[in-house]
Image: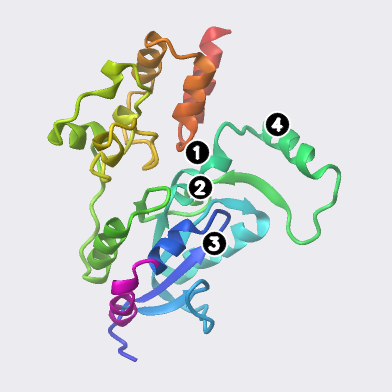
């Protein structure tokens, strides 16, 4: 084994495991990935997993049990760099949206009743940065192949990956698309982090926000724009929160207070 290879662990918390599966779907590049790095742990791909020190830990899924909190903190202690991959890890995922503690408790009881959890106690779903410091974020639901390979290459090469500071609208304009908002469609391009190349709008489909909210997004403007387009308030909330997890909960909480 080449000791100069970066030691990498890939971990899955609560989610659909789509991001880990996407890495496996890099079939033509998979051997190169395993040759370029010392993959210490990857339950979906290997059985001889090692819980040792790591240069990089890639973590997908939201934190949804007390055991996962402990597991995540252990990963952070062992890894020099922690990367949140996929929307569940970066923003909490679908299971993290619109769930204050009271609503979460009520929903948990509706599903499980008064059954006492003996395996591990459930907690309100949150992104991994609710419990540990995260060095890099790789958004997407799931992440994309080219996106991952570029990110992985940069990490292995020791060059810090760059953020996507612009909304999808930037790529959309480069691709010379007609703005779907002008056609009355609920497009979330102004609120969503770029990096996908506006793939949905390129095919006349509105952006649903699967790359998560872009930093500095004007939520208030987008909300009232969609409202002016004739969309129902509850529908707007669902659309805007669908892939935003816990990250825009405070916006809707504030909006609710202003109406009271």
- Percent across and percent down for residue 126 are 55, 45
Q: Quadrant of residue 213?
A: top left
Assign a secondary structure to mark 3: helix
At a point 34% along the width and 16% down the height, the residue shown is 184
* Pointer 3 or 2: first along the chain: 3
Colour option used = rainbow
Q: Nearer the viewer, mark 1 or mark 4?
A: 1
| Residue 73: numbered disc | 3
Using a 10 Å C-alpha cutoff, classify the residue at mark 3 as few (fewer than 14 neighbours), some (14 to 19) or many (20 or more): some
Name the image quarter holding the N terminus. bottom left
| Residue 127: numbered disc | 2
- Give the distance between the C-alpha atoms of the residues marked 3 and 4, in whole angstroms: 26 Å
Kindly identify which residue carries mark 4: 102
Tag 2–tag 1 contact (CB < 8 Å): yes
Residue closest to the eye, 184 or 84: 184
- Give the distance between the C-alpha atoms of the residues marked 1 and 4, in whole angstroms: 17 Å
Q: Which stretch appears magenta?
A: 25-36
């Amino acid at each position: 084994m080449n000791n100069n290879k970066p030691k990498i662990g890939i971990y899955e918390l609560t989610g659909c495991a789509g991001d880990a599966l996407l890495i496996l779907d890099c079939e033509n590049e998979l051997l190169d990935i395993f040759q370029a790095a010392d993959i210490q742990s990857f339950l979906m791909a290997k059985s001889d997993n090692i819980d040792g020190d790591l240069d990089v830990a890639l973590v997908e899924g939201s934190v949804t049990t007390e055991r996962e909190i402990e597991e995540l903190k252990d990963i952070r202690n062992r890894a020099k760099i922690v990367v949140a991959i996929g929307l569940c890890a970066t923003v909490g995922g679908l299971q993290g949206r619109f769930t204050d503690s009271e609503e979460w408790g009520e929903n948990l009881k509706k599903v499980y009743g008064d059954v006492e959890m003996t395996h591990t106690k459930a907690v309100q779903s949150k992104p991994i940065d609710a419990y540990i410091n995260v060095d890099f974020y790789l958004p997407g639901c799931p992440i994309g192949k080219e996106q991952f390979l570029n990110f992985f290459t940069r990490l292995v090469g020791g060059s810090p990956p760059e953020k996507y500071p612009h909304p999808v609208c930037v790529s959309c304009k480069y691709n010379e698309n007609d703005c779907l908002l002008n056609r009355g469609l609920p497009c979330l391009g102004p609120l969503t982090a770029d990096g996908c190349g506006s793939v949905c709008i390129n095919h006349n489909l509105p952006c649903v926000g699967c790359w998560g909210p872009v930093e500095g997004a004007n939520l208030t403007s987008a909300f009232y724009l969609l409202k002016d387009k004739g969309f129902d308030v509850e529908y707007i909330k669902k659309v805007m929160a669908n892939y935003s997890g816990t990250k825009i909960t405070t916006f809707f909480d504030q909006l609710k207070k202003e109406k009271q």
